[in-house]
Image: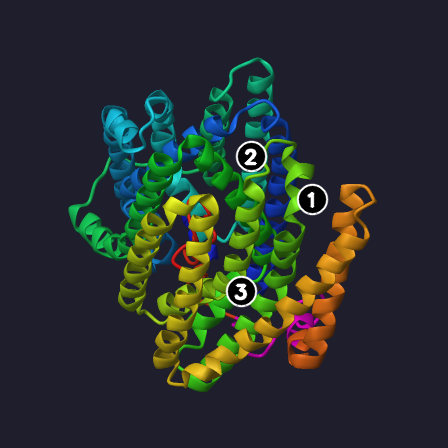
Amino acid sequence: MIDDQLKTSEEPDTSVGRQAAAGVLWLTVQKWAVRLSGLVTIAVLTRFLSPEDFGVVAAASTVLPFFYLLADLGFAAYIVQVDHAGRRLLSTAFWFSALAGVVLGVAVVAAAPLFGLAFDSGEVVPVLQVLALAVLATALGSVPTAILRRAMRFRTLAIQGTVASVVAQVVAVAMVLAGSGVWALVGQVLTVQGLTALLAWTAARWWPSFTFSRRQFAVMARFGGQVLGVECVAVCRQWAETAIVSVGLGMAALGYLNIAQRLVQIVQELTGAALLPVTMVAFAKIRDSADRLREAYLRALRMTYAVLAPPLTLLAVGAPLILPLVFGDGWEESVPVAQILALAGIMVVGATLDHGLFYGLGRPGRWFGYALAIDILTVATTALTVRWGLVGVATGFLVVAAVATASRWFLVARLLRTRPWTLAGPFGFLAAAVPVGAAVGWIVMTATAWLPPIVGVALTGLAILVAYAGATAVLAPSVITDIAGYLPGRDRPDYLPRHSRTGYLPRHTRAGRVGILVNSMEHT
């Protein structure tokens, strides 16, 4: 059964453009379903849990991604893109991941007291020890999930993700109403990871054989090592930033920061999930044509700015209304942090495309060097600005985002064999449109202050959207045409791919993280 599924994804007549469009639709629906239901869950949890509770789980959660990476060792990415994924290769990957999941889970339990000392919180220790089960669940589900991705079964993956997230949210609410406190958040994490792995096994209909190939393991390990480089740097930066904030400002401050980052992340995922997978496929397919590649990149960059900037601008302007509306009272300290991070988010949305560009052109080494430099700068800036509180930390992220954005113009210009100011052009449109949209939004929000908050947010968002549409029509009319080409029933732009042998879509677009736990904003 699984061999048939894998071959289906490799048929030469398969249209990757069509499959990617369908996959984007399903994954976008999943993001909306999960995030909107998640907002309701967070709204309930924040009324029963303290900022310290969120800070404890946020600190513990920064530890887990590193162990997730070691358990998988990049084998899932290898399975997705390899020419032929036979049972021997899949079994080799599974048995390694299973063994690594057990060993690393025990390592998390043993090392938890050390992380408690690093975060200056004894409450982190038992939480992290229980969350070690998530490492095992993730390792066991790695290969089946990769099989589903390889077969481009995005509809199945989207349904599975939605079911797992909604069930986990129900578990969290039930636990917090029962008085479980911080363990409600732990239960939510474990339910998501465990149910996701179980559903992946059910859908993949694959079982490993009792075989292990040293040769294939070595090949997968070489490939996976290249994948892990950037990821490990990002995780280390997360640890450092979490330790700096928790020790310098306390767990409550980390909780306020975590809530602000979650809100920015939600906005980014709900607006950007539909665009990025298609553009990444396009970069990989047209890399042999320099002119088409430059044109595709510039179009994608303009569209990304146009799609993501308005909602992030709404968050930057309307955070004083949005945070109390969503999370209730007591989270006022998160408001200015969310506003600053939203502005930083506007700057770094282009980093996601740049990450995909370098990987699509087979240049991960250059991106690793860039990411390492920016991550070191981010940690140093956080250590310097923590003395001025959360607003100082967030402002530091904004400064790093500006430096990183400008440096990427030179880095990408060399790769595309063009001039840096050519790449700065789309950002010039953004720099003009953001102040216009923000000013209009602030005026409307101020004028509607007497209305219920939800009405004020809606009217402010509508005003910002109209202002952006007007600015786009005047400054960059071609963007409207490009975006219209992605609407259902319209012809795709001519630079999009139509066929592919492997049908590979990356699992993660790791780029643009500003701060801690903002998963869609890595490597500013």
Image coords of residue 468 (percent x, y):
70, 68
| Residue drawn where x is 42% and y is 58% of the image | 511
Q: Quadrant of residue 477?
A: bottom right
Q: State the predominant SS element of the stretch in magenta.
A: loop
- Label 3 crowd (10 A; few <14 / some 14-19 / many >=20): many
Residue 198's disc number = none
Tag 3 residue: 278
Q: Which residues are magenta?
A: 482-498
Q: Earlier in the sequence, mark 1 or mark 3?
A: 3
Q: Judging from the image, what secondary structure is the residue with disc 3 in? A: helix
Callout 3–callout 2 Cβ contact below 8 Å? no
| Residue drawn where x is 78% and y is 57% of the image | 444
Q: Nearer the viewer, residue 48 or 162?
A: 48
Placement of 516 over or under 180, stated as above or below: below
Placement of 63 over or under 274, stated as above or below: above
Q: How far is disc 1 from disc 3 in space, using C-alphas?
A: 34 Å
| Residue drawn where x is 56% and y is 60% of the image | 19
Q: Nearer the viewer, residue 381 or 36?
A: 381
Report the amino acid beneath label 1: Leu
- Label 1 crowd (10 A; few <14 / some 14-19 / many >=20): some
Residue 207 seen by the camera? no
| Residue drawn where x is 42% and y is 46% of the image | 388
Tag 1 residue: 321
Tag 2 residue: 165
Q: How far is disc 3 from disc 2 in space, using C-alphas?
A: 25 Å
